[in-house]
Image: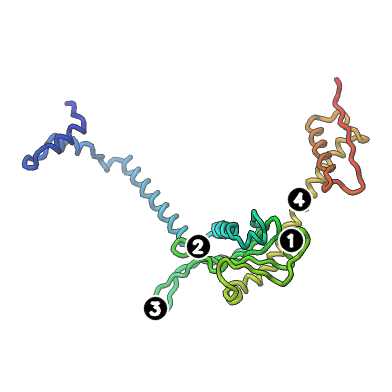
Amino acid sequence: MISPPITDVFISAVTTPRTTPFNRFALQTITGLAVDTSLPFVQLINSGISAVAVLLSFAFLHSYHTISPKAVFREAMKQLSSSAAVQEVLGAPIVGSPVMLTSVWEGGFYFRDMRLRHRSPRVLMAFEVEGPQRKGLVKLEAKKRKGCHVFKLLAFELRNNHQSKSGSSMVGAVARVFLHGSESVHDKGSGSVLNSMSQPYLETLELDRKFEADDDDDKVKEKLSIIRTAVVGGVIQSAPSSAVQQAASGCAELLKPEKSPSGYTVLVSILTPTS
C-alpha cells in the first residue's frame, strides 16, 4: 500500500472535527516516523551526543572559573592602546613585550565561619611596553569574577632606566599612570610584591636582548663563512648558483652601514661561466 504524503495526513487531521476520533491512518503514519531507540547505531549516536555535551559543559566551566594570563595580557594591551594618557607619553602604536612576569592563583573553595566560600582566581603580571617615543613597565592585578576579568590594578610607569629613544631620560624616580586602582592600592596591595619582582624581570629583559644580538652575530658569521669558501682571491670562480646567491646576499648585508665592519671594504666580483 502506498501511503499518502505527510502534508495530506496533517491537513486531514487538522480539518477533522474534535467530536470525531483521530484518523487511525494518520496516527499510524505519524507513529511510523518514530525511530526505534533500541537499534545499535541509534544508541551509538546518542552516546556520542552525550559525550560531546559533557565535554562542552566541562570546557565552559573550566574557562568560567579559571584565569588565563594571555587573555588578561590581551585585554590589558587593548585598554593601554585606547588610553589617551599612555599614548601621549609613549606614542602610537604600543607594542607589548613577549617576555612577561606572571604569578597565578588558581582559586577554589574553602571553609570560613562554618560556610563554604569561593576564592576567585587571580593573576599578578608585569611586562614592558614600547612606543615610538619611550618604553615603560606595566603592572597589573586581575581576577576572574562571574566569567569576566576585573582589574584591581593596572598601572603604567616610567623609570629612570627607561629612557626615550632620543637619549633623554625622565626626571624623577618613577612616574605612574593608573588606569585601574590608585597609589594606595599599589603601595599596600600587590604593587609592593611586583616592585620586588620587577628588578629580576628587567634583568631578564636585558638578557633577552643579548640573546637577540647573539643570534644576529651568528647569522653574520654564517654569511661571512659562505663568502670565504666561495671567494678565491676576491673573485668567485664558477661557483654553483646557490652559493653565488648566498654570497651575493651576504655581501649585500655586509655593505649596509650598520652591518659592515669598520675599516674594511668588501669587493666581490661574480663571474659566470661562458661555456
What residue would you read off at disc 1?
Answer: 164
**Residue 74, how many percent across, how many down?**
57, 56
Q: Nearer the viewer, mark 1 or mark 4?
A: 1
What residue would you read off at disc 2?
Answer: 149
4, 50: nearer the viewer: 4
- Identify residue type, mark 1: Ser
Query: For residue 233, which quarter of the picture?
Result: top right
**Residue 4, how many percent across, how many down?**
18, 29
19, 93: nearer the viewer: 93
Tag 2 or tag 4, which sits nearer the N-term?
2
State how far apart marks 4 and 2 are (Cα).
38 Å
Q: Disc 2, disc 3: CB below 8 Å? A: no
Q: Disc 4, disc 2: CB below 8 Å? A: no
Residue 237 bears which disc, if any?
none
Q: Nearer the viewer, mark 4 or mark 2?
A: 2
- Residue found at x 6% / y 42%: 19
Residue 215 bears which disc, if any?
4
What residue would you read off at disc 3?
Answer: 114
State how far apart marks 2 and 3 are (Cα).
29 Å
State how far apart marks 1 and 4 are (Cα).
25 Å
